[in-house]
Each structure stands twice: as structure tokens, then as C-alpha cells.
Image (cartoon, grey):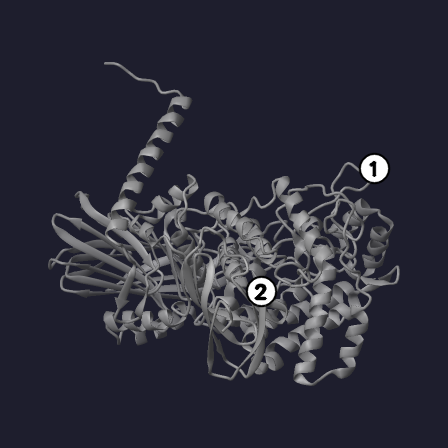
Amino acid sequence: MSIKIIVPEQKQIFKNIMIKLRLIHLLMLVIFLNACNYSIQEENPLVGKHTTYQLWYQQPANNWNEALPVGNGRLGAMVFGDVYNERIQLNEESLWAGKRFNGNNPNALNDLPKMRQLIFDGNIKEAYNIGNKSLLSTPPRFRSYQTLGDIFLSSDSLANYSNYRRDLNLNTGISTTTYQINGINFTREVFASAPDNIIVVNISADKPESINTKINLTREKDAIVKAHINQLIMTGQIIDETTKAQGPGGENMKFATKLIAINKGGEIIAENDNLIIKNANELTLILTAATDYNLNILNYDRSIDPLSICENILTKAQKKSFSQIRENHINDHSQFFNRVQINLGGEQMSAFPTDVRLDSVKNGNEDPALIALYFQYGRYLLLGSSRTPGILPANLQGLWNEHIKAPWNSDYHTNINLQMNYWPAEVCNLTETVEPLTNLVNKWQEPGKITASEMYGCNGWAMHHATDIFGYTAPNADMRWGMSPLSGVWMTFPLWRHYEFTQNTDHLRNQAYPIMKEAMAFISDFLIEKDDYLVTNPTMSPENAYKLDGKDYPCQLTYAATIDNQTLMAHIDNCVAASEILGIDAGLRENWKQIRSKIPAVKIGKDSTIMEWIIDYDEWEPGHRHMSHLLGLYPLSQITPETPALFDAANKTIEKRLKHGGGHTGWSRAWMINFFARLQQPETAYHHVMALMRKSTQSNLFDSHPPFQIDGNFGGTAGIAEMLLQSHNGVINLLPALPNKWPDGNISGLRARGGFTVDMEWENGILNNVTIHSDNNNNTLIKYKDKLIEIEIKKGESKNLNSEFN
């Protein structure tokens, strides 16, 4: 017997050969499909004629980052598609460890003046030490969002299977697994129904009495499961351990999950906390879950019975057939998802599995239709993680998390990440997804007012860089990351943007403006005078550090960071505009304008880049993932071609950051797409779209920080939209950053500020026609390349223009 030893170099050569052979095979298939004029247009009787956007694979998921997500805003599931031992991982949006507590440091108000003076004097290390002792939250950290558990569908048979496929249809919100065993075709569908507030699993076969499986409902800890007749019932309570970082433990959030199995034919046997299904013709599982979380008090509420909630939901759902539940789900989901259609060309590649297409892109090939799919996937994920019946916004992982202790707690980071989650909400025609965010920000005001008062002696409300569903608003973890006192102000921007796009004055009057006004009250008290300016202190530029002359350590704390000045100017402008629209607070408005006049301007440094700090320091990490000092470029609109010096400096700032390795995380790369779209550099924006796909996208198209963070998906979707349509500063700009790789295409349903919906078609890189629909009686400026016109469109009417604006 001979043994062949392959050294690592030979392995890599072999791997490269196999990749090339696979790509040659793909190319041959592409040629064949082009000859067949392959199309992915189809007619669905429930959703009408739309392009089908679908992820699909020829093998089960090997790990969680290959599974496919479904969600209804409150309940989520990750579907693995295994034939013999299917795993469906579950989430309920409010299942968090911990509880509400006041973490405001009792020493903060007393030591704040000393810390401020140390920062003004340049004694940063001493200020840092005082900050960690006297301003940092007590305890310094909070706890994690947690998994609900898993459903397992197990089979005793290990017979060979064929014709395997698993997919996720974004139009319908249904994940489907199909395969054949012994000539019998099996179909398994999974979806999260918003109308019925449940997760549904349906298994069918084309031969009677073919379904035999064992059903488990499991969780790693803090839960018990009982089987009864045709039900699995999980009840539990999170038991937190006492730690120095997170404080006292104890018996905290209660939760329950209930699964009901409904069979056609065969029998169901409850055995050892499992359900055994024998010889069924069809099987439907309906599941729901609940906790005793109460948003109104930002805490668990012992008057809430999670199991009773589950029973009430399932009692209603049981009265409907599977086909009724499925039809209601599709009708509900598609009315949101199908608002936007996009075609960037290259549809023939849709004949290949999604992972194969992604591998092809990662090996240097182009696939415009995969970019369109990625765009729509971002919309799908936002809809699945932020809508009714859910009450909470999308977190760092949206809704989907398999961990008890998640990376970064799967929390709400409010120094870019949560804001980025909602960048696509308005422009991508999912305005309803902002409601959960608005509601939670409104509730954060209450603990935020306590933080503003106890820490800073200020009116209004404040929060810092990371938080949870319990209203944690004190500085978290360490001064190096946590000292961002304007995070609450930043969180008002999505609320104002919602008004800009919808022109809904009820929302402005009753929701957005009261929150904005209270954030303005904090600003008015928090700012202090320095060299004839009003400045923030203490603060930082998330999460970067600078070099202090003669010091060999990184410094984060500062005063008047550029991001703060941009945030302050934008927020004051928003508050002034809102008060004028509503016709209220004229006296406050004038005071706000006075404050605005004393905010330091954005400055250009010695290397012709935007200064990140009030002093022209050198960065400790020139390739840092955060680009906080370019907030004014995007998502704000303070740096534009109308400010040419800053516009040029912003470009140089990004060049420098990228030269030193910036954009290396998924969400940071996504931000680059938006930056270059605003800089009107289509080819560079496209380069970063491809870099996001090639370096930071997993086989199920989840973004990778690494590990998985959903903000990169949302930022990427927003960036693609920004390349095709911009509407800031009173101008709707058509195709402002259309790259050469998308010469022919169309998009419909994008939204523009002012209450407009825009449909566009282009050919050979030139706009063919555009239709603009109006929800209001508004005039607007329309721009395409060097053409600019003003049009008036009455409410409910549309105007169609060609590239000459005729």
C-alpha cells in the first residue's frame, strides 16, 4: 500500500485548480442559459408579477452562518435544512439577561468639573483615570440578548437522498427545503407569520403515510420542556450569575414557548418530553413564545404570564388551516417587500446556487444580479427584525442570535451601529420599520433624564454608546469606548428623517419633536464655553484615539470632537425646522440659533483632511474602522459639492483611512459605499460594494464584522440605494453614482424626501425615463447630471420624465 503525502503548498495548488474548474463549469452553464434566454420573472397568484428574489443552495447548512433567517419582528428562526436532524434555532425579541438598574456613577457630578479641566489642560491620562472611577457606570457593563432555543426534527432513517434544495424566497418570506428519499418527494416550509404571531413549520410528502419524525424543543439552560398529547411546552427563567462587571445576578426574565403539532393521518405520541410522529401524510407545527418584558416600564413585569400569552396566540391560530395561515402571511409580507423592485442586469446567474455565485464573486467575477439580491436581502432582514407584532428595534444581529452570551451582547450600539440599521428604512420604502425604534427611543428618555441630571446636572435626556432594552444610559465598559454623551442626540436623527420622507406632521408633533426638544434641553445645559465657543466635554470620537505629543499611549478623551460639532449643528437645524413647521417654541428657537452660532466649525488639518478632533492630532490608528468625523458627509448632508473645500478634504480623509487599512469590518465597508456615493464617485462606490461582498459576506449573505453583525447588511443596502437616488438638501438627484458595471437596469419604489416615490429605468448608462409619484402637494428640484428643473406634483399624482426632462 502506498501513502501519498500532500504538503500545504500542494493542497493550495489543488484547491486553486478545483476553483478554476468549478468556474469553467459555471461559465459553460451561463452560456447555455443565455442561449435559453433564462428569466426569473414569475407570476405568484398571491403576490402578483414580480421578480423573484431567492437565496438557494444544494446542501444543508453546516453551521449557523449558513442557515436561512425568517422573522416577523418579534419571533425569528434560523433554518438549517438538514434532512435527518433538522435544526431550527429560535429567537424572541425581548429575551434578554439582566434587568433595569440605575448605573449612574454617584461620583460623576462631583468629579465632572475636575475631569473637564484636565481635558482642557491636556492631562488626558489623569482625566481617563478619573472618568473610569467617577463617570463609568456602576457596574460597568450590562447583559446579553439570548437565544430562545431550538427545534430539532430527527429521523431514524438514514436512507440516501437526492434532488436536494433549500431556499429562502424573499418575496414570500418562506424558507423551503425539498429532497427525495426512496422515490418520495418531501417538502418542508418554515415562515414567521406576523398576522398570526407564530412560527410555522409544514412538512408534506407526495406519498401517504411517509412522514415519521421525532420533535424536540431544547434550550441550553434555564428552561424545562414537557410533552403533552400533541404539544411541547417550554417554561423558563433566566438565572444571572453575579459578576464584577455586570453586578448582582438573580432570577430575572421569565419566558415560555409552546409548540403544537397538527397531523393529517398517522399519529402523534408524547414520549419523554418529545413528540413522535408516525406515518403522517402531512404535519404542521405552530409555535409561539413570550416573555414577561414590559416596554412601558423597561423591565420585566411579574403581572405578565408568558405561557398564557402563548396559549392565547395559538388558540386563535389553531382555528385556521395551514393554507389560510400561509396565504395571510404571504399577503402581509409581500405588501411591504414588493414595494421595491430592482434589476441591475445579469439575471442568468440566478440559475446557480447562492453560495456558488458568492464564491465566483470572491474569485473576481461580476454578478450584478447578486448585488440586487443582496440589496433586497437587506430590506428583507430589516422587515423581519423591526415591525409589528414586534415592539423592539433591530439589534446588532437584527433578531437572530444563537448564543446565551452573544458577541457584543447583540445589544444596541448607539455610536453608529443602531443608526446604520435604519439607514435603508425610508429610502427603501420600509418606513413602518422605524416605529419600534421610535417607541424605544421614547422610552429611553426616562432613564436618560436621570442620567442627564445625576451625571451632568443637566435638564433633558442623554445616553452613551451602548444600551439594552432596560434603558441603560450611563457610560458603558470603559472611557475608551463609552464616553459619547451625544448618542441620544444622534438617535433622534432617524425620527427626524422619518418626517423628512413622510411629511407626517402628526408624527413630528406627537413623537419626534418632543424627543428632539428634550435632547436639545440637554445640549443647552451640557455645553460649556471654551475660547468663545460652546463645546462638549468630556467626549471622544468613536472609537478612535490620537497621539499626544511626548506620550507613548493612545488618548481618546477630548472636547469638541468633530463628530459632536456636526451632530450639534444638525440637531439644532432639525429642531429649528421642526418648531417652524409646527409653529411653536419661537423663543426657544432663537436661543437654539444662538447656540448654533457658537459651535466650532469643521476644520481641515495640516494634511488636507478633515480634522477628527478640535486639535490637529495624529491618529493613533490611521486605519481605524470608525469614520466619525465624516458624519457630515453621510448620513448628514453638511459636506457636499456646495462646500468644495470640505468636499475635497472628505475625499482625502477617506483615502488616508483606506491607505492604512480602513474599511476592514463589514459595517465600516458599508459606510464607505455611502461615502463614495455622496462623493459622486460611482466606480469607487462600486469597488466597495464588491469588497463588501468579497471580504465581509458569508454564504447566507449575512454580514461579517467578523463575527456576524447585521448593520453591514443594512448599510450596504442603503449604500446601493444611495448610488441610485439621493434626496438631501432639497434636490432629488437621479443616478448620482451609477457605475459602468450596471449599464442597463431599472428600479421602482425608492423613496425621496418630501414624500415622493421614484421609479427609474436606464440603458447604456443613460437615464431613459423616471416617474415621480407624490404623497403631498410639494414642489421639488430634480437633478440628473448637469440638468436641474423644478416640478410641482399634486398629491396622489405622478409625473413622467425622460433623460432630457421632457
Q: Residue at x 58, y 61 (%)?
A: 419
Quarter of the view holding residue 381: bottom left
Q: Position of residue 202 (x, y in %)?
A: 25, 62
Quarter of the view holding residue 447: bottom right
Residue type, numbered disc 1: Gly
Q: Secondary structure at mark 1?
A: loop
Q: Is 695 in front, or is 545?
A: 695
Q: 124 above or below 455?
A: above
Q: Residue at x 80, y 70 (%)?
A: 595
Q: Position of residue 646 (x, y in %)?
A: 72, 56
Left/right placement of residue 525 relative to residue 575 reads right
Residue assigned mark 2:
470
Q: CA distance from mark 1 to mark 2?
A: 43 Å
Q: Position of residue 248 (x, y in %)?
A: 60, 55
Q: Residue furthest top?
A: 1
Judge depth for marks 1 and 2 and give the one in front: 1
Left/right placement of residue 187 relative to residue 703 reads left
Q: On the rendered image, what quadrant is the N terminus found in?
A: top left
* Residue 601 in sight in this render: yes
Asked if the residue under mark 2 is in contact with the one under mark 1, i.e. CB atoms within 8 Å, the reply is: no
